[in-house]
Image (tube, coloured by chain):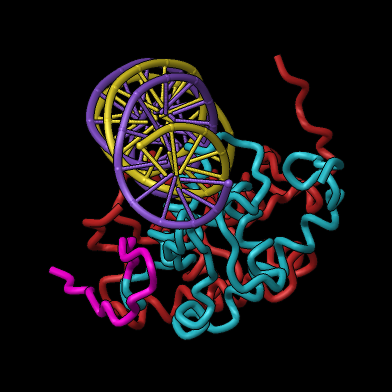
Chain colours: A red, B cyan, C yellow, D purple
DNA sequence: CGACTTGTACGATAGCTCTCGTAGTACGTT
DNA sequence: AACGTACTACGAGAGCTATCGTACAAGTCG
């Protein structure tokens, strides 16, 4: 019952995901999205060089449903850009938008996350989450 | 397990409030604390030059109880340092600790908050108060 | 002392969040 | 078409959070 896509873009799958526009991104939402260990981990890995990663390439200690949830929170906060590519969903940081809105913030956040991970035993990045 | 009690300051009222030690501060907690508009506002005002402010000097559009709650969240996350001075409770940013743990983060955060406030009409920050 | 100023504690409520499992959809491959 | 892969939607439970009002404590000042 929904009108099929315009088919103007021959890129394989044409099902799109809703993203907030750049001006729609709220700092509070970004911070909230990053205040969860799983999600902070995702952003940290993504910032570590990789341009795009599929959801399943992250080794999160949660179920698939929960994983989907976290990626959605990040996308809806404007932190990630997600597009379908075949059966996979590619995830990329919205670095351009974030840097434009909040210059230097993303770098500081990622740097802080890396420092903390290093301080608290880099190996067990997210495995042990007895806090929260 | 933690043994605080430096007790080196005999300032008037001697009822102390529990603060996390520097190494105890978690990035996730800081980000969570700052992901609330009221609390982000508090930090923004505090960073705007003032060294110490009492709780009541902030004009938050919430009840006193709620205000107390927000200040406590900020203190327990390690963002604020609170001490009693007479009947008043003074609030100060833990800039030294935060800068040591996460260099540049606090500045980026405050800058981002200011930018967003400016973008979205600085005047009506949280509760347009033209009466001040 | 009594009044007033500041802020806390307690209880309560509505709403959100993290987590999961199960069932299902979309896509590619055989 | 049949199958496997990758991810989603839905429903649900436990726990946290933001908010409030009322009653109370600690300190200052007339």
Residue A130: image x %, image y %?
21, 56
Where, by quadrant of the figure, is residue B83 drawn? bottom left
Would you say the magenta stretch is mainly helix, strand or loop?
Answer: loop
Q: Left of A64 or right of it: where is D10?
A: right
Residue A25: image x %, image y %?
72, 50
The quadrant of the picture occupied by the N terminus of chain B is bottom left
- Which residue is pictured at 61% across the width and 61% down the height? B43
- Viewer-proximal residue, A8 or A99? A99
Q: Left of A109 or right of it: where is A66?
A: left
Q: Left of D14 or right of it: where is A26?
A: right
Residue B31: image x %, image y %?
50, 60
- Viewer-proximal residue, B126 or A93? B126
Residue A21 in view in this figure: yes
Assess whether residue B8 is covered by the magenta stretch. yes
Where, by quadrant of the figure, is residue D3 drawn? top left
Region in magenta: B1-20
- Which residue is pictured at 26% across the width and 71% down the height? A124
- Which residue is pictured at 43% across the width and 81% down the height? A115
- Which residue is pictured at 44% across the width and 81% down the height? B101
Assess whether residue B86 is covered by the magenta stretch. no
Residue C28: image x %, image y %?
54, 48
- Viewer-proximal residue, B86 or B25? B86
């Amino acid at each position: 019952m929904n009108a099929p896509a315009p088919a103007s873009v021959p890129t394989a799958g044409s099902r799109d995901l809703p993203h907030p526009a750049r001006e729609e991104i709220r700092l509070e939402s970004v911070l909230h999205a990053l205040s969860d260990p799983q999600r902070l981990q995702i952003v940290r890995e993504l910032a570590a060089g990789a341009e795009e990663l599929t959801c399943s390439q992250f080794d999160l200690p949660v179920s698939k449903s929960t994983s989907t949830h976290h990626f959605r929170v990040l996308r809806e906060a404007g932190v990630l850009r997600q597009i379908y590519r075949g059966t996979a969903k590619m995830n990329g940081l919205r670095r351009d938008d974030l840097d434009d809105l909040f210059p230097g913030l993303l770098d500081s956040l990622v740097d802080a996350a890396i420092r903390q991970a290093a301080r608290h035993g880099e190996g067990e990045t997210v495995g042990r989450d007895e806090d929260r």
